[in-house]
Image (cartoon, helix red, strand yellow):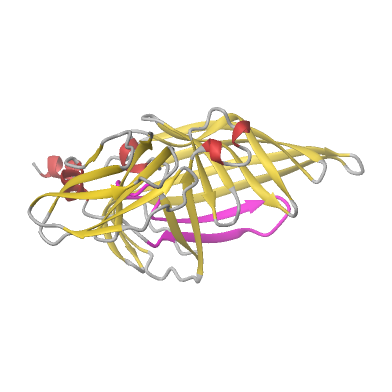
């Protein structure tokens, strides 16, 4: 009996619980490095000493809305960060994959195009599951063409409770991500040139949050001093079981909508809901609709009569935390 209880306590990372969706908005604090602690079952990882003042944000947008979207035909989402970097990903029921990035560099951009995508996570992912993935990309920087290739070793190495500056979170999964890669090029005045890298990183995931809720890493390379850092999410969704029951009642109709759409959802007594509308660029296009629940069904009307025809996303926030994003169309 004790063994059965222990097994049931092991969270499983799922595509629905982890994959980002268009319209998601993320905010993270960049912090100093702290020890990742131990692997294993029923761990308590205390990262409450994470401190930092730098905040980075990102928004999930459609690939076609980005400047270089046509270069990544296999991607189905793009992450637009506050630093100006775009990441191009493909989400599916089996994996979360990286197909490339575009990063600002001076007055231009460096386009990292992957000939073989990088598998950042597999689904479903159970405790002690692991995999190895090889990947490759090419990019041009300062007039030289670089060929990047690497191998990732990924293992779900622990689960338990994670303590962050913002609070304590249970049913958290830890993934140990070890990335070994190299950049090779030929420089006319120098000859063949190779840089090797090793990124040793730990990610903490909580189903219902479409990004790691924390990470720490040490990045070493063959030409410079190591980099050590970390991040934690400033908004974390908890109470997944209760939210799943609530969101199963969530309906958005009609879809397509011409002048008005309605959101119907069953809330617990006095639970606060906020509905935000975003366009495909990730910009909020209407003031938030805010309500407080009562027992039974609650319906909220969204005026879309002034919005141009196109694709939009309705975000549902429950008690201040993002719970769901739904796609709908305005058509007349």
The residue located at (33%, 33%) in the rendering is 256
Quick check: 124 above or below 161?
Answer: above
Q: Is residue 245 left or right of residue 260?
A: left
Residue 270 among those drawn in magenta = no
Asked whether 256 or 27 is in front, the reply is 256
Location of the N terminus by quadrant is top left
Q: Where is residue 144 in the image (x, y as percent from the top left)?
A: 81, 40
As drawn, the residue found furthest toward the right would be: 189
Rendered image quadrant of residue 317: bottom left
The quarter in which the C terminus is drawn is top left
In this rendering, position of residue 223 left or right of residue 300: right
Rendered location of residue 242, percent (x, y): 16, 50
- In the rendered image, residue 216, in percent from the top left (x then y), is placed at 47, 57
- Can residue 14 be seen at all in this image of the molecule? no
Residue at x 26%, y 35% (from the top left corner): 254
Near-viewer residue (233 or 248): 248
Q: Please give the range of residues in magenta.
A: 205-234
Q: Which residue is drawn at 74% across and 55% down?
A: 106
Image label count: 0
Was residue 221 drawn as part of the magenta stretch in this picture? Answer: yes
Q: Where is residue 234 in the image (x, y as percent from the top left)?
A: 39, 62
**Residue 262 visible in the picture:** yes
Q: Is residue 189 above or below residue 34?
A: above
């Amino acid at each position: 009996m004790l063994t059965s209880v222990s097994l049931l306590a092991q969270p499983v990372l799922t595509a629905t619980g982890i994959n980002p969706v268009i319209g998601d908005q993320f905010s993270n604090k960049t912090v100093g490095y702290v020890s990742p602690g131990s692997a294993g079952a029923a761990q308590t990882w205390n990262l409450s000493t994470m401190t930092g003042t730098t905040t980075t944000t990102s928004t999930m947008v459609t690939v076609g809305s980005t400047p270089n979207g046509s270069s990544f035909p296999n991607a189905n989402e793009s992450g637009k960060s506050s630093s100006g970097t775009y990441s191009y990903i493909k989400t599916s029921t089996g994996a979360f994959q990286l197909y490339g990035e575009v990063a600002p560099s001076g007055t231009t951009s460096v386009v990292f195009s992957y000939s073989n995508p990088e598998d950042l996570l597999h689904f479903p992912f159970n405790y002690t599951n692991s995999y190895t993935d090889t990947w490759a990309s090419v990019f041009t920087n300062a007039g030289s063409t670089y060929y990047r290739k690497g191998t990732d070793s990924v293992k779900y190495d622990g689960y338990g409770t994670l303590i962050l500056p913002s609070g304590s979170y249970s049913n958290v999964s830890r993934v140990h991500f070890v990335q070994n890669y190299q950049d090779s090029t030929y420089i006319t005045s120098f000859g063949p040139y190779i840089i090797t890298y090793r990124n040793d990183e730990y990610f903490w995931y909580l189903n219902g949050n479409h990004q790691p809720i924390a990470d720490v890493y040490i990045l070493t390379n063959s030409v410079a001093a190591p980099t050590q850092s970390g991040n934690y999410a400033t908004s974390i969704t908890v109470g997944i079981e209760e939210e799943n029951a609530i969101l199963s009642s969530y309906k958005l109709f009609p879809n397509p909508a011409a002048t008005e759409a309605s959101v119907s959802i069953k809330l617990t007594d006095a639970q606060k809901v906020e509905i935000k509308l975003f366009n495909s660029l990730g910009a909020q296009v209407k003031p938030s609709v805010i309500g407080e629940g009562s027992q039974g069904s609650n319906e909220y009307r969204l005026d879309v009569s002034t919005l141009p025809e196109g694709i939009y996303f309705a975000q549902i926030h429950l008690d201040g935390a993002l719970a769901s994003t739904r796609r709908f169309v305005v058509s007349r």
